[in-house]
Image: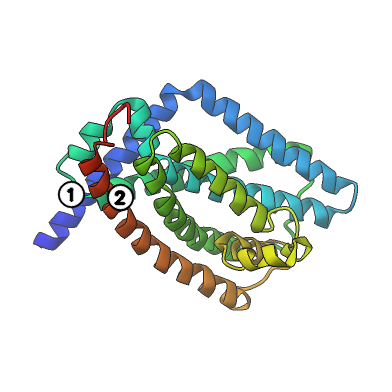
Amino acid sequence: MRLAGELVREFKASFAFVERNFYLTKRYLGWEIVFLSYSTVNALTIGLIGVTQSSEMVMYLVIGALFWSFLGNIFMIVSESVAWERWEGTIEYTFMAPIRRLTHLGGMCLFGIIYGVVRTIIMITILSIFLDFDFGRANIFSALLVLLISSFAFIGLGLIAAVLPLISPERGPQATNIIQALILLISGVYYPISVLPEWLQIFSRLSPGTYALQAARKALLKGAQITELKSELIIIAVIGVILIPLGLWVFNLAEKWAMRAGKLKRSG
């Protein structure tokens, strides 16, 4: 009972960060609309390129755009969690608060998933007005499972990248955006990784995004069952199992260093 009560308290504390981030989203609603509009128009533009080829090409490109929008946003929210604390002037209070770091980062990750789901639903609704989606053969359940498991892998990547703004307040947030761009390049979001130079394909095989997109396209374009996606799902899950504990461990080390170096302040 004591353990259950403690878990409930930790979950409530994590959800407090979810609630706070939704208030921040509401506060910057104008910018949220700008970013959502840009992402939607970008996905629509890419989808319209496929119209000149075939309906399957439209689906191929739109699946890439939507999955990347979801997973890329999770990575961004988690990796920039420290940067946001600094921009809002709350970094000292958050890191000195009597809560576990896992609780804090868990709340950020949970918000990233909820925010990503809402954002993706809005994008799909708008895109369906302009593009003719053919989900006749799609296995939606398999695709959702791919999305869920992939979320944890990208959370792990985000936790590792979140160390950079902690170490370098000035250059860290810039570095996280560069990392996100590189993941976009190597993951085959809009093309098969076979078109990349051979030396770059080595890095593609290390990206969870590569396997997430391959599995998602099999599920939505070919109606693949979960058993047919077993190899991709196992790889994504293993990456997530490795990266999340690794990210938490690295973040904990970086936090201790930042405290000693005096980096946990608004001005950096």
Query: Residue 89, image x and y in percent?
Result: 30, 26
* 90 is higher (above) or lower (below) than 213: above
CB atoms of marks 1 and 2 within 8 Å: no
Label 1 vs 2, first from the N-terminus: 1
**Is residue 139 shown left or right of residue 51?**
left
The outermost residue toward the left is: 2
Task: Please name the residue shown 61% across and 51% down the image.
Answer: 182
Query: Residue 169, image x and y in percent?
Result: 38, 35
**Is residue 260 shown left or right of residue 177?**
left
What amino acid type is highlighted by mark number 2? Ala
Write down the residue under mark 1. Answer: 9
Quarter of the image containing the C terminus? top left
Write down the residue under mark 2. Answer: 254
Query: Residue 257, image x and y in percent?
Result: 25, 47
* 65 is higher (above) or lower (below) than 263: below
Residue 132 has which mark?
Answer: none
What amino acid type is highlighted by mark number 1? Arg
